[in-house]
Image (cartoon, rainbow, N blue to C red):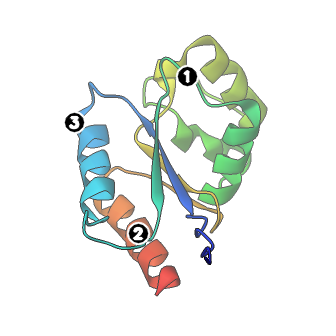
Amino acid sequence: MSFRDIPKLPILSIFHNPSCSKSCAALRLLESAVPATATIPAYRIDVVDYIKEPPTATQLRLAAQFLGLKGEAVQAMLRPDAPRVRDVDDVIRIIEEQPAILERPLVIDWEAGKAVIGRPPEKVQELIRERVTAEE
């Protein structure tokens, strides 16, 4: 009897708010891009309700890096009504206190080192396209 290796799938995490229409649209895009009939899907989806389970400091640092944000540009990781920040440490402090201030949906391809904030949802489609292309 022989055993085949089970492939380790790349993970795309979505920091999701089920009450947000943009976040729900991004999740539908992620789910619809993985056909149920696929023998080996291009990725696995990790849905994180960030209100109940806020991102860790390490996840936020990596997200900022993958988004290409430094210094005050990390403000883009927060909702428009959030307090002003100077750096990722400020973002971490704010999200620890008020996770709902995180801009959503935040989708991260950990293996590729890429992330997008899915506003508009087409940004999520581009990340999916890149992941699917990488797997072909």
Q: Which residue is drawn at 61% across and 73% down?
A: 3
Q: Which amino acid does label 2 sit on?
A: Pro
Q: What residue type is labelled 1?
A: Glu
Q: Which of 32 and 108 is in front in this view?
A: 32
- Between the residue at mark 3 and the residue at mark 1, the CA separation in whole angstroms equals 19 Å
Q: How many labels does the image show?
A: 3
- Between the residue at mark 2 and the residue at mark 1, the CA separation in whole angstroms equals 26 Å
Residue at the disc numbered 3: 21
Taking 131 as reference, is 85 left or right? right
Of all residues, the one furthest to the bottom in this rendering is 136
Q: Residue at x 37, y 59 (%)?
A: 124
Sequence-wise first label, 3 or 2: 3
Q: Nearer the viewer, residue 33 or 84?
A: 33
Marks 3/2 in contact by CB < 8 Å: the verdict is no
Classify mark 1: helix, strand or loop: loop
- Answer few, some or many: residues within 10 Å of disc 3's Cα (few below 14, many 20 plus, some between 14 and 19): few
- Between the residue at mark 3 and the residue at mark 2, the CA separation in whole angstroms equals 26 Å
Residue at the disc numbered 1: 53
Please determine whether, in this image, residue 135 is positioned above or below residue 11.
Answer: below
Residue 126 x, y percent position in the rendering: 38, 70
Instruction: Quadrant for residue 74, please give it.
Output: top right
Classify mark 3: helix, strand or loop: helix
Instruction: Quadrant for residue 16, please give it.
Output: top left
Residue at the disc numbered 2: 41
Please determine whether, in this image, residue 24 is positioned above or below residue 100.
Answer: below
